[in-house]
Amino acid sequence: MLNEQKSENPLKKSEILSPEELNALFGSGPFPPPKKEETPSNKEENMASEILSQDEVMNILSMMAGDKPSPKSETTPPKRKKRRDPFRINRVDKSRMKTLHVIHEGVARKFAAKVSSMIPCFLEAKLTAVDQMSYSEFTFGLDNPSYYNLLSIETPAKLDNGISYSKFLGHIALDINTSICYPLIDRLLGGGREPALSARRPLTTIELALIKQVTYKFLTELQAAWKKTIQLNFSIVQTESNQQIIQQFAPNELMVILCFEVSTFESRGGLSIAMPVTVLDQILPVEKKEKKKK
């Protein structure tokens, strides 16, 4: 029995011929190599290889139309352009910004001298900055409540038949901080050198009438400073304690901001003008540079 069991043992693995060896002995016989099991990753690779590229599709379509296939063109991905905010572009050149600085420095000095003659105390005013920003950025930095004015600008003009009229140029904004408004009102009412209390509240009707006298002094000096360049007439259209009420300008409109600092012995506050660039282009147009002849 033991001998029979031994004779029935299967062949050793080393004695079994592989399909490659059988093909070598009998030629390309019917002994195909074992198929590899397809995995999900292999299936995806096969599907990707079967998908035609855009160039191959175009070549097939051109061949169907009777044209010669075009060689494969190396397509490079388009470069992404950096997004530019049009309202951050400095539209006002440096020469005009310098001119604005020179004009309004004189306005600050003369305004301080005029107001000092009205009140029994020394007042100092100086131009601190000339900048460009959007209207929303300008109003974001203002106090609330404040003394906020909407001004209109007009210039005298004549028609072809000789009739004179006032040409409307646009609106600008004038803001005076209440931290300097209340001390000035106190001095106008005969207050002494004791520091005035700066209340965080809107101005009353009587206080508005008093502070408007100071505002008219500033506008008079502003008009006189621009007279050498262009004759302008400034007038107050609307006055509010909250600048958000006046919806005259778009939030993203580009403005030129003129910042002044007004100070007395014990108090200090800001005065600022916001002028749209569209208005500035009419008042102070861009100088056209003549091309040099070769």
Image (cartoon, rainbow, N blue to C red):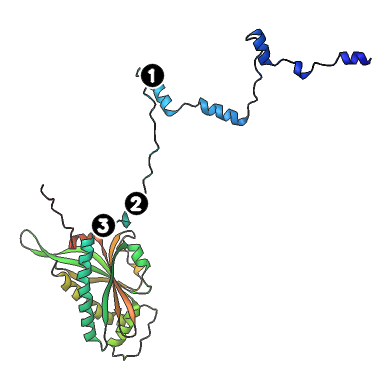
Q: In terms of sequence position, does the residue under pointer 3 or pointer 1 come before the other?
A: 1
How many neighbours does mark 2 have within 10 angstroms: few (below 14), some (14-19), or many (20 or more)?
few
Q: Amino acid at mark 1?
A: Met
The furthest residue to the top: 26
- Of residue 149 and residue 217, the one placed in the foreground of this image is 217
Q: In terms of sequence position, does the residue under pointer 2 or pointer 1 come before the other?
A: 1
Tell whether 127 sits left or right of 72: left
- 2 and 1 marks in contact (CB < 8 Å): no
Residue 203 visible at all: no
Q: Secondary structure at mark 1?
A: helix
Task: Say above or below: 117 vs 281.
Answer: below
The furthest residue to the left: 161
| Number of numbered discs overlaid on the protein picture | 3
Q: Position of residue 39 (x, y in %)?
A: 63, 29
Q: CA distance from mark 2 to mark 1?
A: 44 Å
Q: In terms of sequence position, does the residue under pointer 2 or pointer 3 come before the other?
A: 2
Residue 228 visible at all: yes
Disc 2 designates what residue?
A: 84
Q: CA distance from mark 3 to mark 1?
A: 54 Å
Disc 3 designates what residue?
A: 91
- Residue 58: image quadrant is top left
In the image, which disc is placed on residue 63?
A: 1
